[in-house]
Image (cartoon, helix red, strand yellow):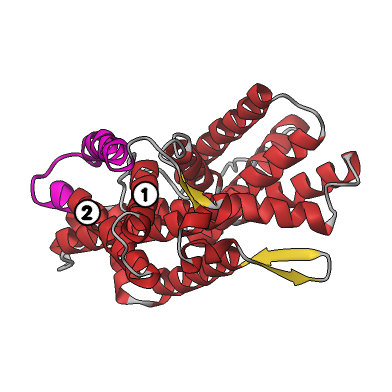
Amino acid sequence: MTTTATKEPSPQEFDVRRNDSLGLRLQHLLHGNPTLGPLAVLIVAIIAFSIANQRFFSAANLSLVLAQVTVIAVLALGQTLIILTAGIDLSVGAVAVFSSILMASFATKIGVPGLLALILGLICGTAMGALNGFLVTRIKLPPFIVTLGTLSIFFSLNAVVSNSETIRGSDMPGIMTWTGTTIPIGGFRLTYGSIIMLLLFAFFFYALGSTAWGKHVYATGDDIESARLAGIRTNRVLFSVYTVAGLLYAVGAWILIGRLASASPNVGVDYNLDSITAVVLGGTSLFGGRGGVLGTLIGALIVGVFRNGLQLAGVEVVWQGFAIGLLVLVAVSLDQWIRKVKT
């Protein structure tokens, strides 16, 4: 009787197996905790920029960073809901800017009381989101095509309504610019707009993680056909997501008015890219079904920290964009690698 001896791995093979094991464990860890990677990037960036420039970690500068990312974070929150369903929204900036112009115009040109003008602006933003949802769910057009079309429509209407003129905050009722009011906390200055932003993220963190609606959003984005066969009304879920996103963009418009102390038709060109960047950097997959709003908040902070830190370091704007673009490519590549995890 002969026996076959088990071949011992060579030192080189052992190293390869050990490295594979570490890689797989990291892959599983990031797959189960999508926000872990973005959080690590944010912490490392804060430490690095604080060492490079002492002004970075000052209360005044951190207040500025938070105020700068507040509008983008709220817009990215709506974008996150849509990307979780495997869609995308290219009309983010157009809806937000048009909503801000409508709010200001209702109050200053028509003479509607401030609170009513604000409510009408929020309703208009919600209606624009609902239009996107209707075209996606009823006409069955791809989200990319739908929002590309409404992007042009809303920006054109925006120019018509505003006559390409900026409406000053001093001409508006106080409630329109209230979101830009700051609350001093030591050396830190927190705006009401930032407080609204944090409350919205807390609400949707709960809604996505602890309600049937949130679970249906993830299921629809992960596999829409399986979700439909499981009894989920996927069209209703998609329509609700686009409608809620429109409302969030309108809230972002209100915060934008407070931030700029005016309503201008000439802003918002970069909001589409910035909102998608925050979502991707936050670990939400562009293919839907994976990620969350906490990661998006971290992603928006990453963008703000990098831009502020590079600005303090004297880096030109064009190279700031280069660095952010590089981060996006790394994030998408990492997402592709994580999605290949074997469960």
> Considering the numbered disc 2 on the image, is that residue within a helix, a strand or a loop?
helix
Q: Magenta region: which residues?
A: 133-162
- Select label 1 or label 2 by which is in front: 1
The residue lying at 54 percent from left, 31 percent from top is 329
Q: Which residue is mark 1?
A: 101
* Among the two numbered marks 1 and 2 on one chain, the one whose residue lies closer to the N terminus: 1
Judge whether 266 appears above or below 100 on screen: above
Q: Quadrant of residue 317?
A: top right
User: Residue 202: horizontal and vertical position, in percent?
Assistant: 51, 72
Number of labels in the image equals: 2
> Considering the numbered disc 1 on the image, is that residue within a helix, a strand or a loop?
helix
User: Would you say residue 134 is visible in this rendering?
Assistant: yes
Judge whether 277 appears above or below 105 on screen: above
Q: Magenta: predominant secondary structure element?
A: helix
Q: Which residue is mark 2?
A: 224
User: 126 or 328, which is in the foreground?
Assistant: 126
Q: Amino acid at mark 1?
A: Ile
Distance from Cα at disc 1 to Cα at disc 2: 36 Å
Left or right: where does residue 109 sit relative to residue 326? left
User: Residue 56: horizontal and vertical position, in percent?
Assistant: 83, 47
Left or right: where does residue 295 sit relative to residue 65? left
The residue lying at 74 percent from left, 30 percent from top is 12
Which image quadrant: the C terminus? bottom left
Which image quadrant: the N terminus? top right
User: 312 or 288, which is in the foreground?
Assistant: 312
Judge whether 173 appears above or below 269 on screen: below
The residue lying at 38 percent from left, 72 percent from top is 115
Left or right: where does residue 284 sit relative to residue 141? right
The residue lying at 51 percent from left, 67 percent from top is 174
